[in-house]
Image: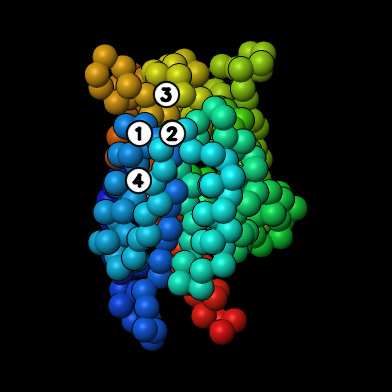
């Protein structure tokens, strides 16, 4: 069975739209984004996020900079957005040019407006089992995808391929929490893991987030496993995942496609986090 992230994300966007329509306020939730340079992939991702915001009723403030922008200019812009009471979420589209210190930029964002969930404050609270202001969007989207597909996580062995700060590490922290819809046994494999296939073939749920096109073959997967493909790779002019989808599909119980799997869920969670930020501010007002 194919898990349609596109379909589930549309359901979530519909729910967000209804919630926003019912808000008793003079303004809508607001997401401000910072885009540096003219990276075509980044521009496309931002365009999709803006379109989704417009669809549900979230206003957008755009802040675009030339590729040679000074780091101090970005820090000043972030500081301004942190202090702006009409801005609920701040998105810094990655990657940034090599001359910009990504850690400095990420840490400059107010944790209570960090709707990407990348700030050390939010990641730290997630790891410690405390409630963060925000969970990173892709791990949160994967979790939501599993829950809405009625896939049990508790007591299951989840193997995550990839140890990035965006997906692998926070997803491992999220799925091992002592909560009703988590409690998984999590193994994380990476480029220096020995006998990777031996480990992945034990997974009840296999999450592939390496950025290696069609790398995961059927002999690396247990029969009846659930496979979540996070990879987005361009191969011969076509978008493909980390999983060799057509060869793997016959032996798994459920699998996400690329495109149309995890990607739309990431955007939906960004919008969900933005509404959450708005609601948190409203409770404090």
Q: Earlier in the sequence, mark 3 or mark 2?
A: 2
Left or right of residue 217: residue 2:
left
Q: Earlier in the sequence, mark 3 or mark 1?
A: 1
What is the CA distance from the residue labelled 1 to the residue labelled 4?
11 Å
What is the CA distance from the residue labelled 2 to the residue labelled 4?
16 Å
- Give the quadrant of residue 169: top right
SS category of the residue bearing label 4:
helix
Q: Is residue 177 visible?
A: no
Q: Earlier in the sequence, mark 2 or mark 4?
A: 4
Relative vertical location of residue 139 with respect to residue 209 in this rendering, above or below: below
Label drawn at residue 67:
2
SS category of the residue bearing label 3:
loop
Q: In percent of the image, x 47 and y 33: which residue is there?
A: 68
Label drawn at residue 38:
1
Q: Nearer the viewer, residue 62 or 41?
A: 62
Q: Nearer the viewer, residue 37 or 250?
A: 37
Nearer the camera: disc 3 or disc 4: 4
Tag 4 residue: 46
Image coordinates for residue 132, horizontal then vertical, percent: 64, 60
Left or right of residue 250: residue 80:
right
Tag 3 residue: 242
Q: Are marks 1 and 2 in contact (CB under 8 Å)?
A: yes
Q: Is residue 116 visible?
A: yes
Q: Are marks 1 and 4 in contact (CB under 8 Å)?
A: no
Q: In percent of the image, x 56 and y 24: which residue is there?
A: 200
């Amino acid at each position: 069975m194919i898990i349609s992230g596109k379909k589930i994300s549309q359901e979530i966007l519909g729910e967000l739209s209804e919630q926003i329509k019912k808000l008793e306020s003079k303004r809508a939730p607001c997401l401000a984004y910072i885009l540096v340079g003219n990276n075509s992939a980044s521009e496309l991702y931002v365009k999709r996020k803006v379109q989704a915001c417009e669809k549900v009723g979230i206003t957008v403030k755009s802040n675009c900079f030339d590729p040679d922008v000074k780091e101090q200019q970005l820090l000043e812009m972030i500081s301004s957005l942190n202090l702006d009471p009409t801005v609920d979420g701040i998105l810094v589209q990655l990657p940034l040019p090599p001359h910009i210190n990504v850690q400095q930029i990420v840490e400059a964002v107010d944790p209570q407006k960090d709707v990407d969930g990348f700030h050390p404050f939010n990641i730290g609270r997630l790891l410690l089992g405390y409630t963060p202001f925000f969970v990173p969007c892709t791990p949160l989207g994967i979790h939501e995808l599993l829950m809405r597909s009625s896939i049990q996580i508790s007591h299951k062995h989840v193997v995550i391929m990839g140890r990035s700060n965006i997906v692998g590490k926070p997803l491992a922290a999220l799925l091992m929490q002592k909560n009703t819809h988590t409690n998984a046994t999590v193994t994380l494999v990476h480029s220096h893991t020995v006998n990777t296939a031996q480990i992945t073939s034990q997974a009840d749920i296999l999450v592939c987030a390496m950025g290696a096109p069609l790398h995961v073959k059927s002999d690396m997967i247990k029969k009846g496993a659930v496979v979540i493909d996070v990879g987005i790779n361009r191969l011969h002019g076509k978008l493909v995942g980390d999983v060799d989808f057509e060869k793997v599909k016959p032996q798994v119980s459920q699998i996400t496609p690329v495109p149309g799997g995890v990607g739309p869920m990431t955007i939906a969670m960004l919008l969900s986090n933005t509404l959450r930020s708005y609601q948190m501010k409203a409770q404090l007002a």
